[in-house]
Image (cartoon, helix red, strand yellow):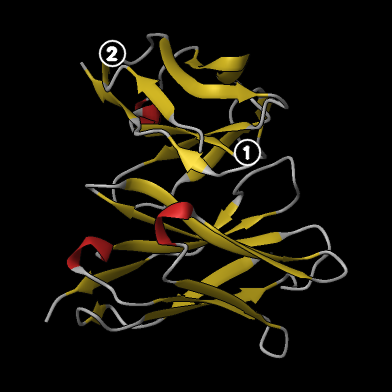
Amino acid sequence: QVQLQQSGPGLVKPSQTLSLTCAISGDSVSSNSVAWNWIRQSPSRGLEWLGRTYYRSKWYIEYGLSVKSRITVNPDTSKNHFSLQLNSVTPEDTAVYYCAREPNYWQSFDLWGQGTMVTVSS
Amino acid sequence: EIVLTQSPGTLSLSPGARATLSCRASQTLTYGDLAWFQQKPGQVPRLLIYGASKRATGTPDRFSGSGSGTDFTLTISRLEPEDFAVYYCQSYDDSRTFGQGTKVEIK
């Protein structure tokens, strides 16, 4: 049974970096068919896709336009997890952050992490 | 980037009624890469439909998806008490975007 377990702080100060990790069990971050995503949800912005990483003989990383200048998504094969870093956060970045799996190119997000409420406040 | 517009914003219906939810894309989804999610308060979104019309594992057959091009529909044939929730459409052809959601509430 595949599971995604998120970890990271729930409170980040303005201008600092938000960092979250998604640990994968029952699957591999290096799988040749799967993509690993970060998504967030807030009342003001709704559900917003942030970025993803996937392995197809080499690593690919893609970012959403709204956060492209501030985001880094990285896979870690030694720990079988992937991470999110969002720089220069503002209160607008306050949201529930999710990691999610796309099992293949035709099926969208079939498995989600439990969600992490991140508040940006001093 | 594709924009998805869902209508109506809220649907007030009784258990047993038929629900029809709409999702319109700002550009043609050439390969029909459109999914529907259900989200209940305090829960993670759950994939119901992918590829516009294919049920995800565990999705009851009262849920059906249809449409192509720019216009897509999620139909719930007979609402059960557990179906009252917010529903989101999502495109995944090139960019990945979500609609703003339709809340299905008890009338």
Question: Which chain contains the residue that carries disc 2?
Answer: B
Mark yes or no: residue A39 visible. Answer: yes
Q: Residue furthest top?
A: B17
Residue at 27% from the left image edge and 22% from the top image edge: B9
Q: Where is residue A69, by image quadrant?
A: bottom left
Q: Amino acid at mark 1?
A: Gly
Q: Residue furthest left?
A: A122
Q: Are marks 2 and 1 in contact (CB under 8 Å)?
A: no
User: Which of B66 and B76 lies nearest the eye of the viewer?
Assistant: B66
Q: Amino acid at mark 2?
A: Leu
Q: Where is residue B59, by image quadrant?
A: top right
Q: Are marks 2 and 1 on the same chain?
A: yes
Q: Quadrant of the C terminus of chain A?
A: bottom left
- The answer to whether residue B88 is left or right of residue A79 is left
Q: Residue furthest bottom?
A: A78
- Mark 2 neighbour density, 10 Å: few (under 14) some (14–19) many (20 or more): some
Q: Which mark is residue B13?
A: 2
* Above or below, comparing residue B70 to residue A30 in the picture: above
- Mark 1 neighbour density, 10 Å: few (under 14) some (14–19) many (20 or more): few
Question: Which chain contains the residue that carries disc 1?
Answer: B
Residue A102 picture location, percent across and down:
66, 53
Residue B96 picture location, percent across and down:
55, 44
* Above or below, comparing residue A39 to residue A82 in the picture: above
- The answer to whether residue B10 is left or right of residue B69 is left
Residue A120 picture location, percent across and down:
20, 73
Residue at 41% from the left image edge and 33% from the top image edge: B99
Q: Quadrant of the N terminus of chain A?
A: bottom right
Residue at 35% from the left image edge and 27% from the top image edge: B81
Q: Which mark is residue B58?
A: 1
Number of numbered discs: 2
Label 2 or label 1, whichever comes before in sequence order:
2
Residue A43 picture location, percent across and down:
23, 48
